[in-house]
Image (spheres, rainbow, N blue to C red):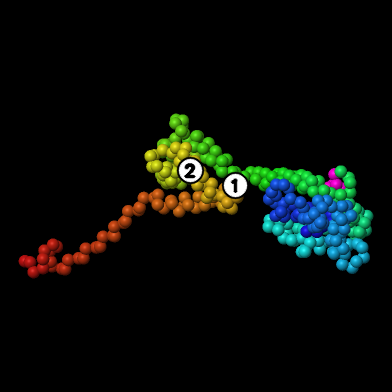
Amino acid sequence: MKRFFGSGLFAVVLVMSPAFAQAPQPVPLPQWFVEIDTGKKGEVTRAEFLKYRMKTFDELDVNKDGKLTIDEYVKVAEPPFSQDLPNGPTLEERRNRARAEFQNLDTDRDGFVERAEAEALVQSEFNQYDSDRDNKVTEPEVRLIMQRLMAREAAERRQIEMRRRQGMVAINDFIDMQMEEADKLDKNNDGKVSQQEYVVLAGPADGPQAQGLLPYDIRRQLVMRKFQEIDANKDGQLDRVEMTAYAVRRFIEIDANKDRFLTEEEFKQAQEAETKKMRELIPATQPPQPRQAPPPQPTPAAPPGVAPGLPQRTR
């Protein structure tokens, strides 16, 4: 991709390109160096660099008046100057960045980026590569700069990812949380949770704290269903292997977007799904209601003149 400025939008786009996303050793040369050094001399002069970078200016300067309006400059965010990249900035984001860069390039604030202003920025970029100030950039110089740039970009990406993941829960953290809860239930500290220890999750059987809750028998049955789900070997106890395996299964279920981290929203959705599941199980925990016998039918009255219980024609 051609460009005539050294930082901002297209520096980011350049680094995000596949050639730099997974750079093998040694650090690859940037595309501009390869395109300029067609003779494979291993160096690029200041004049060659300036000519190469200013090609973009000339292509954007449609009316050839030696300066760019903001409408002309924003075209640098569009093909063929800039392409869409997977997970890269959108076209509108690139245009917004280009508008911001235009303001920085327009040093005299006359509403135009003149050729001299663009050339000054290109010269400044060249100086960043020309570490020994001999007016040429060699392969070792540019590889060192690119290595530093890649390291800085990688560090920035790690910081962004760390900020994004603040408040998220990784699988190890989730397992630790589950083990801490199990330890609270393990009153005799034998490393296992018995049915008697686990059933306390059903809550109080009566008293003020039971107000507003489901009947205790229903709560107890729901809790014991969960116990049976975790108790893989059906020995009536939950050991740490079973609880860890269950925690892993639950993590995979809760991790809706499969990014290996749990967000507050995913926890909320999992809780809602669990509540719905429990409500669906409630009817199965209630004893069947006895069928009511049909009301007795009235005994028909005996015909007149016949004694009750005697067959007719009996004297």
In front: 160, or 29? 29
Residue 261 — which label? 1
Q: Residue at x 87, y 63 (%)?
A: 58
On-image quarter of the C terminus: bottom left
Quadrant of residue 17 in the image?
bottom right
Q: Is residue 58 left or right of residue 217?
A: right
- Few, some or many residues within 10 Å of mark 2 (<14, 14–19, 20+): some
Crowd around label 1: few <14 · some 14–19 · many ≥20 (10 Å): many
Distance from disc 1 to disc 2, alpha carbons, whole Å, reads: 17 Å
User: Disc 2 designates what residue?
Assistant: 245
Is 129 magenta? The answer is: yes
Residue contact between numbered discs 1 and 2, judged by CB atoms under 8 Å: no
Residue 37 picture quarter: bottom right
Name which residue lies at 85% across and 44% down: 131
Point out residue 224 in the picture as x, y percentages from the top left corner. Answer: 42, 43
- The residue lying at 43 percent from left, 46 percent from top is 229
The image shows residue 267 at horizontal and vertical percentages of 57, 48
The x and y percentages for residue 314 are 7, 66
Secondary structure under tag 2 reads: helix
Magenta part of the chain: 127-131
Q: Is residue 172 above or below residue 76?
A: above
Residue type, label 2: Ala
Residue at 84%, 52% in the rendered image: 44
Left or right: where 231 falls relative to 13 = left
- Whether residue 206 is visible here, answered yes or no, is no
- Identify the mark nearer the N-term, 1 or 2: 2
Name the element at disc 1.
strand
Q: Nearer the viewer, residue 299 or 184?
A: 184
